[in-house]
Amino acid sequence: MNRTRAFLSVAAALAIAWAAFPCQLSSAESAPGGWSRSPGKRILYFTKSSGFEHSVVKRPASGDLSHSEKVLTDLGRQHGFAVTCTKDGRIFSSPDLASFDVFVFYTSGMLTEPGTDKQPPMTPDGKQALLDAIRRGKGFVGVHAANDSFHVQPDPSDKSSRFKAYGDKVDPFIAMLGGEFIRHGPQQVATMRVADPRFPGLDGVPERFDSLDEWYTFKDFAPDLHVILVQETRGMKGIDYQRAPFPATWARRHGQGRVFYTSMGHREDVWTHPRFQRILLGGLGWAAGNVDADVPATIDTVTPGHREIQPETEPKP
């Protein structure tokens, strides 16, 4: 058995072993995303951390799954899709890549380097294979730190380069995903505004809702973003939110592929919250092609101040 086959077997075994992990959203009939009509889809959940490693993707021990891996695997068990969890970037150079319907990323840093978690990185060819697969029709879902990956280089330790807009010079991964992470302030309760209540997973979600999480700020948004949730910045604590409201959850088409992203998901209790699970299942279902939704570009009308970038430092008195 070659290395690629070996780690895929281990990843699949881990996913099966944690299939009984309890989540809050348990009714298949109430789940969005068309999963009851489209069983058997395959999801690859990739959680390599070449940069900062979040607690929700950190595995407590060898042979264990992380918190978010357990949650997503159990959602798959409940709703009829299979989840393979891995941190090994060699999967993107494997023929098995074609067997997956949706790629879910909760990642950080330069994923073509071993980085923080020392797991095998993507190769440059593997990265291109991923982007080609999405363009040809595979689905992609980014959660929270996914766009803290492949920053424009060099990316110095003071992160000063992140406070500039690079437009069409962003990394091809960021161009596919639709926006790049800048920085976040302190965890706090903040308001999300629903911009598209008809998108899968948003039915029953209040027009505005508050949630405690770590809230990212972004730049270099794709011009064709369809905004689903808006980060309301008024009243938020910290210099990072001294800017106009901006997209926080969105969808876009990338060639024939469907791309969905949500900034939520830093905290463990967010992953077990029914509202987050509904939004995630809806985005997954749309990305997998289970359900359709109109996703015209709405970024300029819904968030007209999205090009604003917050100050890097507090102004001197």
Image (cartoon, helix red, strand yellow):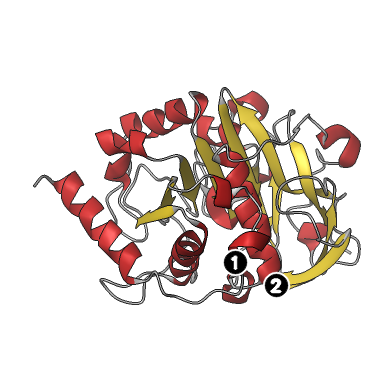
- Image quarter where the C terminus lies is bottom right
Q: The residue tagged with tag 1: helix, strand or loop?
A: loop
Q: Amino acid at mark 2?
A: Gln
Image spot of residue 197 (x, y percent): 83, 49
Asked whether residue 203 is in view, the answer is: yes
Residue appearing at x 73%, y 34% in the figure: 225
Give the alpha-carbon distance from disc 2 to disc 1, as whole Å.
9 Å
Left or right of residue 195, residue 139 in this image? left
Residue 128 versus residue 67: which sits nearer the camera?
Answer: 67
Tell me the residue that label 1 is attached to.
266
Image spot of residue 237 (x, y percent): 82, 69
Asked whether residue 46 is in view, the answer is: no
Residue appearing at x 65%, y 72% in the figure: 273
Image spot of residue 299 (x, y percent): 81, 36
Disc 1 crowd, CA 10 A, few/some/many (<14, 14-19, 20+): many
Q: Amino acid at mark 1?
A: His
Quarter holding residue 251: top right
Viewer-side label of 2, 1:
1
Residue 187 is marked as 2
Q: Are marks 2 and 1 in contact (CB under 8 Å)?
A: yes
On screen, residue 119 above or below 20 = above
